[in-house]
Image (cartoon, rainbow, N blue to C red):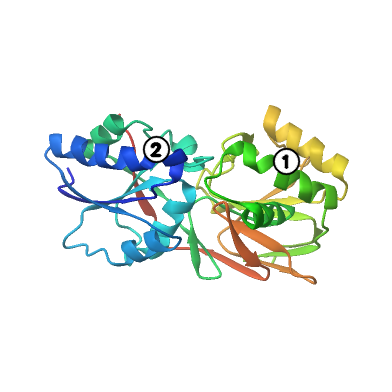
Amino acid sequence: MYRRVLILANPISGGGRSRRAAPALVAALAARGIAAELRFTTQGGDAKRFAGEVDRAQTDLVVSVGGDGTLNEVVNGLQDPSTPLAMLPMGTANVLACELRLPRRVAALADAIAAGRTRPHAIGVANGRRFLLFIGAGLDGAMVERVEQVRSGTLGKLKWFAPVLHVVRRFPQSSIELELEDGTRRDGLSEVMVTNVRNYGGVFRLPRGSGSGEGGFTVLAFRQRTRRAWFRAAAAAFLFGLRDGVHCEVLRAQALRLRAATPAPFQIDGEFGGTTPLEITRLAEPARLVVPPL
């Protein structure tokens, strides 16, 4: 059982529900004999900074209360990335919570923390920044970039529609070159996704076997060059899942490079990350995530 817990909470996540849920988690843990310190973020970067101050001699577990972006900040701030982590999902997509079926209620998370069961989850590194979920370069990156340009206040799934349609109407073209660590190359790609998980945004299903953790990253190489082709692939992902050889090519890699003659935008764990080139590797030590007891 963990005895000393640090809770880092984004108070605006979940339309403000995090502001109420975080203190409730402190109380639920206290009822189970676990002491918890709560720190609210006030601006972007706070969760990373707070996590960077964690002393393993004083903290057994760090809990992120918020969305996947808040958790990404925490993972990037930790000096020891193997520090046990828990998450109370309060974001828009909650991709990791969907992937691992993490507790969504305060009491259930407190029970999981008290039980102390964890599972390993690979940590990727893209241009020095850690990620738990995925990288998307090309059209996917352009969509996330547009969301951040027009974003105001909290971000719900409905607020994605207008920015996504804006990008699809423009349909910016990228020509991305992919090189795996074994020398395998693909060029002329419209979009590349590098993923540790099996779903995207909590609603789109990736090809079977994605995110299994065996054999490294799952790398999805796309060649759609028209809106119609893109919509067909998106509809397939929503209805029954993308298929290797039909909607994309599926590769496996421990490390890879992405380049483009004209720099292509990319997203990392649902946040705009910049533009290519990209160097992507994995940390030798995985994250340790608290999951429900068996």
Q: Is residue 219 left or right of residue 88?
A: right
Picture residue at 49% right of the left edge, 40% below the top: 94
CB atoms of marks 1 and 2 within 8 Å: no
- Crowding at dot 1, Cα within 10 Å, few <14 / some 14-19 / many 20+, comes out as some
Q: Nearer the viewer, residue 146 or 208?
A: 146
Kindly identify which numbered label has been placed on residue 17: 2
Q: Which residue is mark 1?
A: 244
The picture places residue 24, in percent across and down from the top left corner, at 25, 36
Mark 1 secondary-structure assignment: loop
Q: Is residue 25 left or right of residue 196?
A: left
Q: Nearer the viewer, residue 5 or 101?
A: 5
In the displayed structure, 40 sits above or below 13; it is: below
Quadrant location, the N terminus: top left
Residue at the far left: name it: 33
Q: Amino acid at mark 2?
A: Arg
Q: Earlier in the sequence, mark 1 or mark 2?
A: 2
- Crowding at dot 2, Cα within 10 Å, few <14 / some 14-19 / many 20+, comes out as some
* Residue 208 visible: no
